[in-house]
Amino acid sequence: MKSIKIFVLLGIISILVLSPMYVASKTKTISGAITSVEAGNGSVGTTIKINIGSSKNIKEGDLGWVSKGSEVIAYIKIISVHSNSAIAIVTTHQHVVKVTSGLSVGFKVEVTETKPKSDKEKSEEWFKKGREQHKKEHYEEAVRSFTEAIKINPNYEEAYKNRAYSYSRMKKYTQAISDFKRALEINPNNEYYYWVLAVTYKNYEGTWHGTAKDYLRIGCEHGDSNCCRNYHWHLEDPGSYE
């Protein structure tokens, strides 16, 4: 039973992490007006009714102020909230002007906004999930995650490279070769890809003397030390590489 709960919890976390939305909080000023004085003489202890419109951010206990023009004349506290109005009590009043209907009120409240994630953020989240799955040797799941990252960003070099690693672990060498070649297309200055292509072809064909040989040679020409070392060691005179 405990393992089932953990599995469900991990599933919920995964959904939240890979959700196409993210939540952001910020402080917002909400304005309204006093519609009536419910009780009191306009000083401390006076209860007032406030029009807050359709705002859903006002809640019981929120603190605000009453102003006349640009001048604050009193401070208030919400004691109950209704559909389009709220009841507040005056907590501080040190002004000759009494709190009356028609005066403006304001509140500083925390507003939670749900915003869509950018494609870059979504693709990076899928990529990170794929990396974690690969580390745990869940290669099929990793391939699916890297594929989602590539769907969002077709030029995601690292996603192609890491998906190729997962394919290689699964001995799906043709798919791995295709992904390494695509990564090389995206970043032709990375000579490392000649080395991993040589290794993958060697695993696929069972010999260094097939297509692997060509990639070792090309990689060596591009300056990859692994390609040079293995090209000379396996295919020429072992003593010719220093």
Image (tube, rainbow, N blue to C red):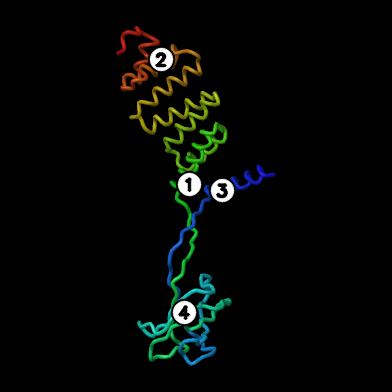
Inspect the image, locate mark 3, and give the three-letter code of the amino acid beneath it: Ile
Q: Quadrant of the C terminus?
A: top left
Please name whichever residue, 138 or 149, is drawn nearer the observer in this view of the structure: 138
Q: Quadrant of the N terminus?
A: top right
- Residue linked to disc 1: 122
Mark 3 and mark 2 residues within 8 Å of each other at the beta carbon: no
Residues packed near mark 3 inside 10 Å, few (<14), some (14 to 19) or many (20 plus): few
Considering every residue shown, the one lying at the far right of the view is 1
Residues packed near mark 2 inside 10 Å, few (<14), some (14 to 19) or many (20 plus): many
- Residue linked to disc 4: 32
Q: Secondary structure at mark 2?
A: helix
Residues packed near mark 1 inside 10 Å, few (<14), some (14 to 19) or many (20 plus): many
Label 4 or label 2, whichever lies nearer to me, is 4
- Residue linked to disc 2: 213
Marks 1 and 4, how far apart at CA: 39 Å
- Residue linked to disc 3: 13
